[in-house]
Amino acid sequence: MSNLLRQMFDKARIENRAALIGYLPAGFPNQGDSIKIIKNMVAGGVDAIEVGFPYSDPVMDGPVIQAASEQAIKNGAGVKQVFELLQATAQLDVPAMVMSYWSPIEKYGCANFAQMVSKMGGSGVITPDLTLEESSDWRQESQKNSIDNIYVVAPSTTDERLKKVCENCSGFVYAASLMGVTGARDAVSGNAKSLVERIRKITTTPVAVGLGVSNKGQAKEVAQYADGVIVGSAFIKIIQEHGSGRKGLKQIKQLANALSEGVRDAR
């Protein structure tokens, strides 16, 4: 596990809480404002950041993240912006990761991508659509460059497969709380807790839950059983509704504060 991620989960464990992880696509709403948004997320209590690689065919993403990705792509966001934002985030002294579909990584070159993540101070890469069977090269390059390769598992993953995936996953296991796409929801799926329990039986690697957490109450609920709580759409929605000026940034920080209180009040 990358040092920063390990330190983050250790610190959260000592404080008897879950870690709070935020997500933002690079170049949303534009590259200059994306770092301001991340700074406010971190100032509000977010422990780690996932920098999204905007992609034209985001099969796992709900309408909020899809719209944000489309806007970022229109603004010319690509691999250069992803690495720029990753570096700027890492300089805030928090674990910074890239979340990317496999196609852009493959296009850039698996070895080159891993090297660049490491060079920019990144802690790891989350690959939601990369299957275990097709990832031996990527795992090799990740290890070579001392970055974590983080897989996504879902409630539908069989026990046998879960064991294999967890054995090859480092940093943390990304547990998708439900079948379906990302997005803020009124309630977090009950499947999340049983999935975390299943993962705990087979690995000591931390488990972070994503898909659907959007407010303090939900963060608190998930933090009762997970090591990490991942929030993306709720942050993006604020910018879509209020812009990335002073008002939007203030609300980003307030949401981060509320979520941070939620993970701290859980246990």
Image (cartoon, rainbow, N blue to C red):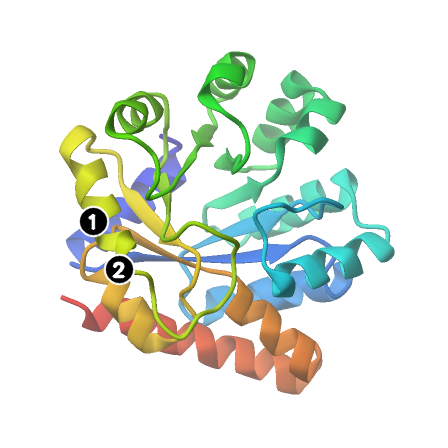
- Picture coordinates of residue 145, whole percent (x, y): 52, 20
Query: Left or right: 87 with respect to 260?
Result: right
Q: Residue at x 26, y 70 (%)?
A: 220
Q: Is residue 120 above or below residue 108?
A: below
Query: Left or right: 79 with respect to 76?
Result: left
Q: Secondary structure at mark 2?
A: loop
Q: Residues within 10 Å of mark 2 (few under 14, many from 20)?
A: few
Q: Residue at x 53, y 49 (%)?
A: 50
The disc placed on residue 28 is none
Q: Residues within 10 Å of mark 1 (few under 14, many from 20)?
A: few
- Picture coordinates of residue 2, whole percent (x, y): 40, 32
Q: Residue furthest bottom?
A: 247
Q: Quadrant of residue 167?
A: top left
Residues at badges 2 and 1 in contact (C-beta under 8 Å)?
yes
Look at mark 1 in the image and give the residue it sits on: 194
Q: Secondary structure at mark 1?
A: helix
